[in-house]
Amino acid sequence: WKSENAYINIFYLLVLINLFAMIPSWINRLMRAQAKKNSDKGSQVTSTDKKAFDQQRRSVLHSSLLYRTYLPAYLLATAADWLQGPYKYALYSSYGYTQRDIANLFVVGYGSGMILGS
């Protein structure tokens, strides 16, 4: 029961870390939406506005390209890692590890992957 509470606390901590990691992205998105609203209000287009628009367009194209090349490979690798879970459990169990030991190994493995970014 104690270890179950610890895993629940670890889960909530990881959720909070992920939420805090997303805050800069949300702020950036809100700032872009606000800038777009402000640019829609003005009818005159200056060279500075054109440069900003071109830079934003290049940024969107770059991120779109990144998502098209990186995301499929990342999702495939993540799915493969998740599919290994039951087999790893069976392997650890056959070596004589207890359920608690196996759970600790999984938490350490996924936690280190989250922290180190792999």
Image: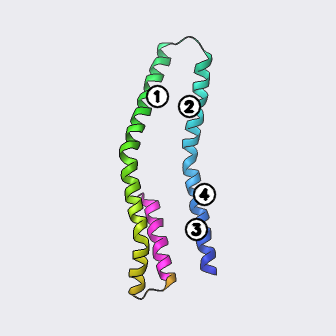
Between the C-alphas of marks 3 and 4, the distance is: 10 Å
Residues in magenta, as a range: 101-118
Which residue occupies 60% across, 74% down? 6
Which comes before the other along the chain, label 4 or label 2? 4
Tag 3 secondary structure:
helix
* Residue most extreme to the top: 44
Q: Name the magenta segment's main secondary structure.
A: helix
Which comes before the other along the chain, label 1 or label 4? 4
Which comes before the other along the chain, label 3 or label 1? 3
Give yes or no for contact between labels 1 and 4 (Cβ–Cβ under 8 Å): no
Which comes before the other along the chain, label 2 or label 3? 3
Question: Which residue is labeled 2 in the image?
Answer: 32
Three-letter code, disc 1: Gln
Three-letter code, disc 3: Ile
* Residue most extreme to the bottom: 96
Crowdedness near tag 3: few (<14), some (14–19) or many (≥20) residues, C-alpha within 10 Å: some
Q: Which colour scheme is used?
A: rainbow
Question: Which residue is labeled 3 in the image?
Answer: 10
Three-letter code, disc 4: Leu
Which comes before the other along the chain, label 3 or label 4? 3
Between the C-alphas of marks 4 and 2, the distance is: 25 Å
Which residue occupies 40% across, 48% down? 71
Residue 33 lies in what quarter of the image? top right
Closest to the observer: 4 or 85? 85
